[in-house]
Image (tube, grey):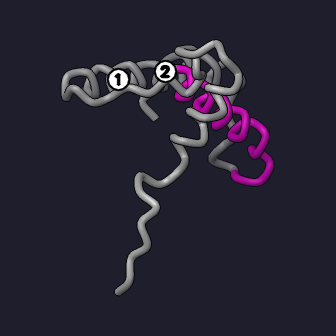
Amino acid sequence: FRDWHVCWVLSLGFELVELSMGWLVPQFKECWWDSLFVDFLGANFIGMKLGLYTLQFLENKGYDWRFSETKNHRKRKGIFLQRFSPFCLKKWEW
């Protein structure tokens, strides 16, 4: 996603799913401190940081999914729709 905040939210969500699904999948059973400190703050942080450094090294475009570049509510809606709409609406006939 190329956004630090989205990566953190996804990481936290996965760790919560892993903790809550321990009763269903035996491999998900682990201590709460292992899930918090080793997985969330350790491995996930290192992986996200290395990934973002790699994207910067490769000069990829970063995205701000929090829309902090605009303060106008109407412009935020437009930017949101623009990001999830196709580049071109030309009809193709095969």
Neighbour tally class for label 2: few under 14, some 14-19, many 20 plus, Cα within 10 Å: some
Residue 53 located left or right of residue 5: left
Q: Which residue is mark 2?
A: 4
Residue at 26% in and 21% down: 56
Main secondary structure found in the magenta portion: helix
Q: Which residue is mark 1?
A: 52
Residue at 35% in and 23% down: 52
Foreground residue among 9 and 77: 77
Rendered view: 70 above or below 19 = above
Residue 20 part of the magenta-drawn span: yes
Neighbour tally class for label 1: few under 14, some 14-19, many 20 plus, Cα within 10 Å: some
Which stretch did the figure color magenta? 5-25
Q: Where is residue 49 shown, x and y percent of the image?
A: 38, 19
Rendered view: 25 above or below 9 = below
Residue 20 located left or right of residue 13: right
Q: Where is residue 81 shown, x and y percent of the image?
A: 60, 42
Task: Say which amino acid is labelled 1.
Answer: Leu
Residue at 41% in and 57% down: 88
Q: Where is residue 34 shown, x and y percent of the image?
A: 62, 23
Disc 2 is placed on an element classified as helix
Residue 85 part of the magenta-drawn span: no
Residue 90 located left or right of residue 69: left
Mark closer to the chain start, 2 or 1: 2
User: The C terminus lies in which quarter of the figure?
Assistant: bottom left
Residue located farthest toward the left when viewing the structure as drawn? 58
Task: Say which amino acid is labelled 2.
Answer: Trp
